[in-house]
Image (tube, rainbow, N blue to C red):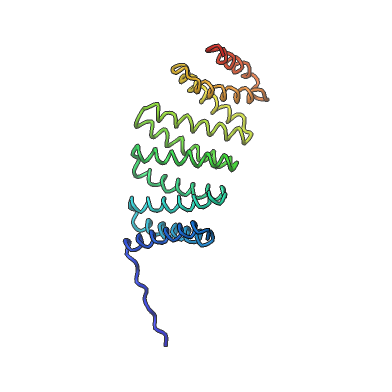
Amino acid sequence: METKIDKKELTNNEKRIKLSEILQQANNFELNGNMIEAEKLYLKTCRIAENLYRHTFSHKDRLKVIECYQKISEYYVNNSRKDLVQRWYQKIIGILQDSSEINSSMDELRYLIDWYIKTINLMFDNNDGNYIVITSKKMLHKAKQLYKKTKTNEDLKFIVLSKLFLANAFYNLNKPINAYYYYRLVALHMEKVYQKLLDEGAKNDLLFVYQKLILLTSKKYLTILNKKWKYRILELKETNNV
């Protein structure tokens, strides 16, 4: 007659120790070129970390989930799997997005926005236009939340960048009306920045947006606005004898 042996449930601290050990094993496998075993263990650490976080919802366990997601992301970066890198970046954003609803400190919001930027840039590489729109709108919401707290130009730039992401995404999706709306908002802001700084970098950024607006208004529906932006770009090019 078989006897059942009860497996002892690991404590949370024991799970954390086990998690660190498996991460190290996965790293060793990767360093030694055993990619299949490395991937298996990295994925295992993600499951363990997620399970632990669901039980504790503690800050340190949330950081451990993010660490595991970053490790598997780096693994896929090294193996040129941008599609899978994006998937794990989106999971990182999901964790940070949820935690930002509880703790919306300036540092937490900036950290989340940094991950939005990193993820959206990858989405452009992957030509994932629809997800760019969804993610950029979420970034815009968080950027406004941050700017409301700080009122600094440093954080205002995240609002403008969100709108630029949206403009570029709609442009690539061949949605000219939506693209025009956001490029125009970005242009209005960049004009103010350039007038204050008279900086060559700001000027080049503004030229890029003007060129997009000219392209958009050279097509149907928006041709009535084409001369306006051509005039603006001529004015800008004439400044500083350029």
Where in the figure is residue 205, as x and y percent of width and height?
53, 24
Residue 45 to residue 146: above or below: below
The answer to which quarter of the image holds residue 25 is bottom left
Residue situated furthest bottom in the rendering: 1
Q: Residue at x 58, y 17 (%)?
A: 233
Residue situated furthest right in the rendering: 220
Q: Residue at x 36, y 76 (%)?
A: 6
In the picture, the quarter occupied by the C terminus is top right
In the picture, the quarter occupied by the N terminus is bottom left
Where in the figure is residue 48, as x and y percent of width and height?
41, 60
Q: Is residue 107 left or right of residue 86?
A: left
Where in the figure is residue 87, as x and y percent of width and height?
52, 49
Q: Is residue 238 left or right of residue 14?
A: right
Front position in the image: 102 or 45: 45
Residue 182 to residue 242: above or below: below
Q: Is residue 180 left or right of residue 147?
A: right
